[in-house]
Image: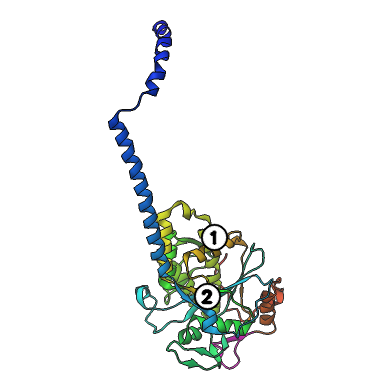
Amino acid sequence: MTHVQTETGPRESRRAPSRRRARPPRRRRRVWRWIALSLVLLVLAAGGAGYWLYSDLNGNIKGVDLDKAIGDNRPEKLPTSGQNLLVLGSDSRSGANASLGTGKVAGARSDTALVIHIPEGRRKAVAVSIPRDTLVTRPECQAKDGSQLPSAKRVMFNSVYSLAGPACVVKTVEQMSGVRLDHFVEIDFAGFKGLVDAIGGVDVTVDQDIHDKSSGLDLTAGEHRLDGTQSLQFVRTRHGIGDGSDLGRIGLQQQFMIALLSEIKKQDLLGSPTKTYKIANGLTKSLTTDSGLASLTKLAEFARSMNGIDPATMETIMLPVKYDTQDPNRVVAAQPNADRLWAALRKDQEIPASAKKSPARGGGSGSSS
């Protein structure tokens, strides 16, 4: 058999070129033409869908013009001061938030407030938590109903949001710290829960049992994978840890923030367009930012600029506070520690150890990072 193939091989090879040069049948040419046309139509359709999805998501984001809302009375932006971002967690119970088991309190407050400082070079970041029970001086602001809200001393920090909205919170933080805030981002309960569920949960470790009837959190000591509902309970828990004050809750919030950022960073979201859209759709519906971040393009650019930051290296600090002498259920900034902290952020310098010490600590966080 091999001998026959060897003898006939040359004759077949001489005819082969003529077969390769032959034109394919007309029917086959029509098939390929239709395939090519279909591919073009698919590309055009995908482009149209992509534009529609972009426009849809872009329209979800609510933007606030800080310069217009606050005016010119803002701290100077130093050329080497890095970037400063205010992150607010709103505790609104309206809309999609009403079904999350967070109570029926009217209005909304800034349940969480973090000043995130990103130094020049953007290789690490510092997150400073401002306790919601801190007594502050609220500057003159425009109230939510459009009226002028006069300046007031010794008001609870989280009440500023409920009376005058996020722009007034930005102005309050700038006045108390002297730090120019470049951006702010606000997310509500539903957006937070949806983000965690969309990425498949977040891993945390607690070093003691936590049972908080108020938030609904029920965890034993050890490692846990929290879904969106449990994560919301986790960052809202305070009665099951420490002295039951807001100060103990801050430790859990800081721990969870690092865990969440680490989970997002390690997931290949670009490798899953469906997951990416699900996250973006849910998150943008619950997102309010300054006008400088109020688009997918601007948010993406800002996120890419921070890509080199490792969440594991982020330093978390609570604003140094002490218990108020007139009301032990409230705290005030502890000086000179607080001023030293803000000065380091303003000048983009290393934070001294003394600026990290808080006389009031809430009896511990009940967690480990």
State which tag comes first along the sequence, 2 or 1: 2
Image vertical order of residue 364 relative to residue 14, above or below: below
Residue 249, disc: 2
Percent coordinates x, y for residue 139 in the rendering: 56, 89
Q: Estimate the spatial distance between the alpha carbons at disc 2 and disc 1, rounded to whole Å.
A: 20 Å
In-front residue for pair 54/87: 54
Image vertical order of residue 167 relative to residue 52, above or below: below
Q: Give the overall secondary structure of the magenta segment.
A: loop
State which mark lies toward you, 2 or 1: 1
Q: State which quadrant residue 121 falls in.
A: bottom right
Residue 262, disc: 1
Q: In which quarter of the image is the C terminus?
A: bottom right
- Residue in view at x 61 percent, y 83 percent: 74
Q: Residues within 10 Å of mark 1 (few under 14, many from 20)?
A: some
Q: State which quadrant residue 95 falls in.
A: bottom left
| Image label count | 2
* Boundaries of the magenta span: 323-333
Percent coordinates x, y for residue 158 in the rendering: 50, 83
Amino acid residing under circle 2? Arg
